[in-house]
Amino acid sequence: MKLTMIKPVSATPCTQLTTPKHKSVISCCTLTQAPAKPTQQIKFTDNFPSWEQLLNPVPVDLKSPMSASTSTSNSTSTSTSTTERPSVRSVRKNWMEYQGVKNWEGLLDPLDGNLRREIIRYGNFVDASYKAFDFDPDSPTYATCKYPKSTVFENSGLPGTGYRITKNLRATSSINLPSWTERAPSWVGTQSSWIGYVAVCKDKDEIARLGRRDVVIALRGTATCLEWLENLRVTLTHLPCGTKVSHAGTHEGSVPMVESGFLSLYTSGTDQVPSLQQMIREEIGRLLQTYGNEPLSLTITGHSLGAALATLAAYDIKSTFNRAPLATVVSFGGPRVGNRSFRHNLEKKGAKVLRIVNEDDLITKVPGFVVEDKKARNVSGSPLVRMAAGFQNWIHKRVEETQWVYSEVGKELRLSSKKSPELSGNDMSTCHDLGTYLHLVENFVSNCPCKSTAKKLLSRVH
């Protein structure tokens, strides 16, 4: 696919957010654009493309006490008081239900308290992948993990998780930049970057609380230049060795297809760096050999780009390992990933996806568009009626053959930042922020106003 480089537009100067507890620095811009002064020297960190804000976490200003200094770098850990273990309540008796074996029926509306705590706990694992990432393009360690594996959780504000990181993960882009970019700063062409980790529950008390040994794969969102460009490759492409399936609403022999850029980041590697797919396969294979004879779960969690890659990883793991454990995706603010055949294959393989969506978040509504999942109609009646129905079916089939028709994957927990009085702003960046998502999960009651009102009345009575 031929890529045309996009010339960045000038924007208002970036603000630097520093947290007192962590010295990491996150750069962000406002969405309001203004021409730069002719004599002003613009650095990359002062001139992000405006669409980057939709793909990267930015600070969120919440009024609630739990987020007094809120950003993706600190709000998610304070939201559950992670100076202690996030939850002491046992889920051992119903852990498979919380992992989605029954598609979370009866647990989402209103949101079950144990499930709420588990979602936030996994969200904090994703938050650690942001905090441990070196975002500073002027740093010699840019796009790597700032800490040793043994201290990532402690340095990210997550002591006492009971988990230990066993594998660092990297994602690699397959995009080849034009030759003139060789004169640009080195960060522009950063091909591979640290994107997350694999962690295993090692603590006996936590294993007893969970009812099994849990393996977590946590993946951050977009951070580097080439990752941004991969996000723009939104046409669907065939999965390697995709299995043809037939189901209602699609033509015979449709094959699983996924977003081109996401697949590139998942499957690409270099001579020095294996692909993310290879790293995950090797580590999961090793862990299955080590712990395969005991109760085991696999939880793959991510935000934004990380949510998309988590879905691909679940599909790949269930396709690769015949005796793979229950694989559950907990995704935050994830974009669409694949077509309807991909979704049906994912469900058939037994992977469970809990897709946590802020209805005000634009990223969850892209890429492509969704066609209603309806079976082609065979209508009896007058020739004119049959002709109209046949034409509608023909249009439906032609649309599905394009490379822009996506399908929503998994069970959805729908949130709304506009309905939260604690949020000070509802701009696109705030709506997509991981801190916003965890805040909304923590305060979520119900999508049904009647249930919400009833709960308030009952609380007054008691």
Image: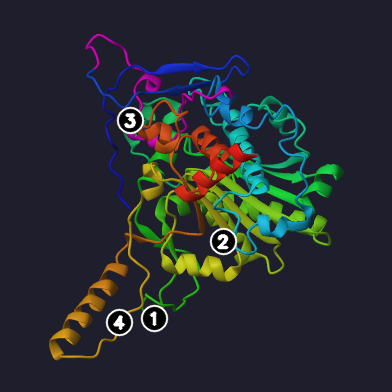
Disc 3 residue type (three-letter): Pro
Cα gap from disc 4 to disc 2, whole angstroms: 31 Å
Cα gap from disc 3 to disc 2, whole angstroms: 32 Å
Q: Between disc 4 and disc 2, whose residue precedes? A: 2
Residue at 65 percent across and 63 percent down: it is 101
Residue at 27 percent across and 32 percent down: it is 7
Q: Between disc 4 and disc 3, whose residue precedes? A: 3
Nearest the viewer among 117 and 316 is 117
Element assignment for label 1: loop
- Identify the residue position indicated by label 1 in the image: 252
- Identify the residue position indicated by label 3 in the image: 49
Residue at 41 percent across and 47 percent down: it is 364
Q: Position of residue 335 (x, y in %)?
A: 43, 49
Horizontal side of residue 331 vs 212, given as left or right: left
Disc 4 residue type (three-letter): Arg
- Identify the residue position indicated by label 4 in the image: 377
The magenta stretch spans residue 60 = yes
Answer above or below: position of 422 versus 177.
above
Which color scheme is applied?
A: rainbow
Q: Name the image quarter holding residue 15.
A: top left
Q: Between disc 1 and disc 3, whose residue precedes? A: 3
Residues in magenta, as a range: 36-65
Residue 315 is labelled as 2
Cα gap from disc 4 to disc 3, whole angstroms: 46 Å
Q: Position of residue 190 (x, y in %)?
A: 47, 34
Element assignment for label 2: helix
Of tags 1 and 4, the one toward the viewer is 4
Nearest the viewer among 64 and 246 is 64
